[in-house]
């Protein structure tokens, strides 16, 4: 099993959350630490999350995993490996999360973590023919590890810009003005008067890209101009980011 693989197919990089390789098939697992109620909308390729009476939209992880499976098949072909089936599943780590879908078409692609073993056994029966021998498995293992590339580019250093000159704050998603004001659980734009509940999402992604791939509640407060530490922690926790550490030592990681 491999975690966080970042590979190149010749024209672009792609990253896989978790990859399980067997003699008969490979499976990509996109693990999400989301709470609340998740509504998968295949027509619009998005997920609506309802949590603490707030509704937010996220990119569809099913489409993301499907794209990764196509990229992996292309990567295997480039490196001369046999064409094996590449399955994919979205795994919701929290057992209390409610999963819904307007149709039933996602029922076999999205599951709680406790259903993963059952799903793997079903896929194993479907692909019972061994397409890779021990030698090929060993070679692919070595190649995957060798071709993995860490994403550690210092963007600011690369473009020769001092981080101190970055204009901090949350941009208005409607007019682009900076900064928005966080008040009573919403982001308010002083320029166009628009209101947003998740405008900080882009600010956090900008921070991950420009500053570093982890952020603390204190750093979030300084970057987004949120006055309350409790509000900062609540906003970060609601984004479904990976978390490490406890209380004041907790950091939020780019997914």
Image (cartoon, rainbow, N blue to C red):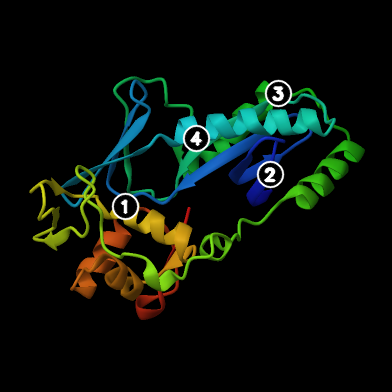
Evaluate whether residue 229 shows in this view. yes
Q: Is residue 110 visible?
A: no
Above or below: residue 132 compared with residue 212? above
Residue 237 to residue 228: above or below: above
- Tell me if mark 3 has few (under 14), some (14-19) or many (20+) residues whose alpha carbon lies within 10 angstroms of its own: some
Mark 1 vs mark 3: give the one in front: 1
204 above or below 27? below
Q: Are the residues tagged 2 and 3 within 8 Å (C-beta)?
A: no
Q: Which residue is mark 2?
A: 7
Identify the image quadrant of residue 250.
bottom left
Give the x, y percent position of residue 152. Answer: 61, 61
- Earlier residue among tags 4 and 2: 2
- First of labels 3, 4 by sequence position: 4
| Distance from the alpha carbon under mark 2 to that under mark 3 | 25 Å
Q: Position of residue 15 (x, y in %)?
A: 60, 44
Q: What is the CA distance from the residue labelled 1 to the residue labelled 2?
A: 26 Å
- For disc 3, the marked residue is 127
Answer with left or right where residue 185 lies relative to residue 10.
Answer: left
Q: Secondary structure at mark 4?
A: helix
Residue 47: percent from the left, percent from the top? 33, 35
Instruction: Identify the residue position indicated by label 4 in the image.
Output: 64
Task: Look at discs 3 and 4 and give the one toward the viewer.
Answer: 4
Mark nearer the N terminus (1 vs 2): 2
Marks 1 and 4, the one that precedes in the sequence: 4
Q: Which residue is mark 1?
A: 201
Numbered disc in front, either 1 or 4 = 1
């Amino acid at each position: 099993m491999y975690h966080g693989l970042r590979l190149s197919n010749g024209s672009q990089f792609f990253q896989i959350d978790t990859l399980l390789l067997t003699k008969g098939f490979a499976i990509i697992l996109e693990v999400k630490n989301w709470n609340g109620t998740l509504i998968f909308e295949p027509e619009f390729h998005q997920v609506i999350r309802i949590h603490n009476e707030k509704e937010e939209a996220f990119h569809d992880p099913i489409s993301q995993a499907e794209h990764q499976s196509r990229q992996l098949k292309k990567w295997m072909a480039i490196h001369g490996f046999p064409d094996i089936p590449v399955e994919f599943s979205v795994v919701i780590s929290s057992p209390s999360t409610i999963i819904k879908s307007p149709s039933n078409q996602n029922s076999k692609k999205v599951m709680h973590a406790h259903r993963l073993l059952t799903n793997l056994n079903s896929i194993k029966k479907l692909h019972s023919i061994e397409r890779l021998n021990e030698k090929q498995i060993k070679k692919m293992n070595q190649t995957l590890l060798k071709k993995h590339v860490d994403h550690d580019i210092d963007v600011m250093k690369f473009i020769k810009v001092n981080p101190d000159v970055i204009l901090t704050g949350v941009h208005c998603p409607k007019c682009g003005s900076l900064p928005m004001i966080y008040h009573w659980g919403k982001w308010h734009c002083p320029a166009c008067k628009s209101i947003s509940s998740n405008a900080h999402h882009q600010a956090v992604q900008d921070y991950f890209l420009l500053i570093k791939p982890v952020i603390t509640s204190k750093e979030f407060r300084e970057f987004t101009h949120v006055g309350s530490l409790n509000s900062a922690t609540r906003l970060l926790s609601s984004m479904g980011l990976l978390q490490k550490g406890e209380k004041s030592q907790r950091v939020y990681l780019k997914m």
